[in-house]
Image (tube, rainbow, N blue to C red):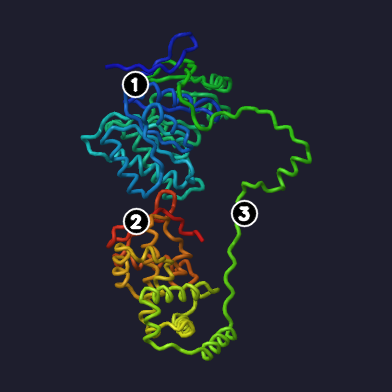
Amino acid sequence: MTVHIDMGEEASGGRAGLDLEELLATRLLVQGNSGSGKSHLLRRLLEQSASWVQQAIIDPEGDFVSLADKYGHVVVDAVGTEKDLQLIAGRVRQHRVSVVLNLEGLDADRQMKAAATFLDGLFDADRALWYPMLVIVDEAQLFAPAAAGEVTEEARRRSLGAMTNLMCRGRKRGLAGVIATQRLAKLAKNVAAEASNFLMGRTFLDIDMARAADLLGMERRQAEAFRNLDRGHFVALGPALSRRPVSVKIGPVETAGRGGSPKLLPLPGQPPADAKDLIFTPSPDEAVRVRPRPPEPQTTGDVLDQLDMVTREPVPTDNQADAELDEGAREAALQGILTEILAEKDAAFRPVATLYQDFQVRCRIAKLPGGVPDLAAFREKLAVARAGVNAETVDGEAWQQAELVAAELPDDMRGVYLLLAKAALAEIPCPGNLEIATAYGTRSPGRARWLLSHMEERGFLVCATDLRGNRIVTLNDLGWRTAPGDEAAA
């Protein structure tokens, strides 16, 4: 069955058609400077063919996510790990769902890695899943650069390899590459050379006009015509388009991108004095961050005065104290004392022996019954306090399991494990290196990375990095997983 897609109108007045089946076998290259109408052309192609063939769009700017509302495309945001994205790509081929891979917000290096991972997942699907699919890559020069740029060599190599596989070997796997670029000179030649269909839009640089003319079989003197093309006008050539170069005006579209072209608007009329106030006076809606003031540390004189007051008061007997203070209240009081100690400046970085001495003094001042906990019990309570665990979290059965697993670690590492367990149980972002280091009693972020590597080697957890560079920690024994978090966060 032959399916013709209406792309618009030819200069002669006839309709400009595109043979979809021929396109699946021969691929398409779109070229044009910014503002020439490339995105409009791709959107026209996607809308006209949405009901005929499965589609996957690599979208670096998030322009094509609007297709989801009208045509049912699933938007795949680049979150999670690379393994997650590769598995999603496999399911896309299995269930024949059209998708938009939204790479908006990622830097160039991570965009290349995410696109390479997704394309590899499509490419590596089982032979039984090789259904026809249009794979549209907008701004292809970002993913198949002709020369090394500011990105890492690993990202460039992976992305270029995935794009080469798409254009060179994708046809047998049902993948038809449609790539759009602003400049042919920036696009890798081995990727551009595999396309047999071309739609060339407005361009101004001599090197790009010369390459466009060569691809279309035009003479060099005819290349000047590309400078005079209006927006939305392209020169088409190829087995799926036309056997000779023809000028095509792309037809209208039903959806719109989130960006669009800027429109001129009149400036608001503001007197100079009012405009100055608007700039330099904060508005009521602006949030003002106030850093909490740390509590003043107790001096030695304060502690001695408190001890002197204790000696003047009658000391109740153990039986009287036990009657007045049950075990639950005793634990709450111990937790409160630990919280006060850790709230002092640099308390998290003091040796455990020094903290224990301070703890003993405060327990005697508070006249807690049952004596002061020994050093081993103090270490366990200190680990929980450093993790910032409140009483509501500790009471849960799940948290008791976390404490049992943490007991298998050395005393100084338990607080770090419980900190991660708290984040995973609450499904909040993974703590940063500084927070992990503080729970361990150090200021070194490198020590935090070592701690995670050490616990990973012992099988307590698995660290992974999502496509945005955020860290995800999975606790193996508990089956819990933190949300993605920035390891450099304060």
Q: Is residue 420 left or right of residue 277?
A: left
Which is in the foreground here, disc 3 or disc 2?
Answer: 3
Measuring from the top left, give residue 453's x and y in whole percent: 36, 65
Q: On the image, numbered disc 1 is attached to which residue?
A: 20
> Counting other residues with Cα less than 10 Å from the Cα at mark 2, is it few (<14), some (14-19), or many (20 or more)?
many
Measuring from the top left, give residue 130's x and y in whole percent: 25, 33
Q: Determine whether the residue tagged by mark 2 lies in a helix, strand or loop.
A: strand
Q: Determine whether the residue tagged by mark 1 lies in a helix, strand or loop.
A: helix
Q: On the image, numbered disc 3 is attached to which residue?
A: 288
What amino acid type should be assigned to the residue bearing mark 2?
Answer: Arg
Q: Is residue 154 left or right of residue 456?
A: right
Q: Is residue 465 left or right of residue 182?
A: left
Measuring from the top left, give residue 23's x and y in whole percent: 35, 23
Which is in the foreground here, disc 2 or disc 1?
Answer: 2
Whole-angstrom CA distance, mark 2 to mark 1, is 45 Å
Q: Are marks 3 and 2 in contact (CB under 8 Å)?
A: no
- The residue that appears at 39% across and 59% down in the rendered structure is 423
What amino acid type should be assigned to the residue bearing mark 3?
Answer: Val
Is residue 383 positioned above or below 34 on the image? below
- The residue that appears at 40% across and 65% down in the rendered structure is 419
Q: On the image, numbered disc 2 is attached to which residue?
A: 481
Whole-angstrom CA distance, mark 3 to mark 2, is 33 Å
Q: Earlier in the sequence, mark 1 or mark 3?
A: 1
Farthest residue, direction left: 128
Farthest residue, direction top: 13
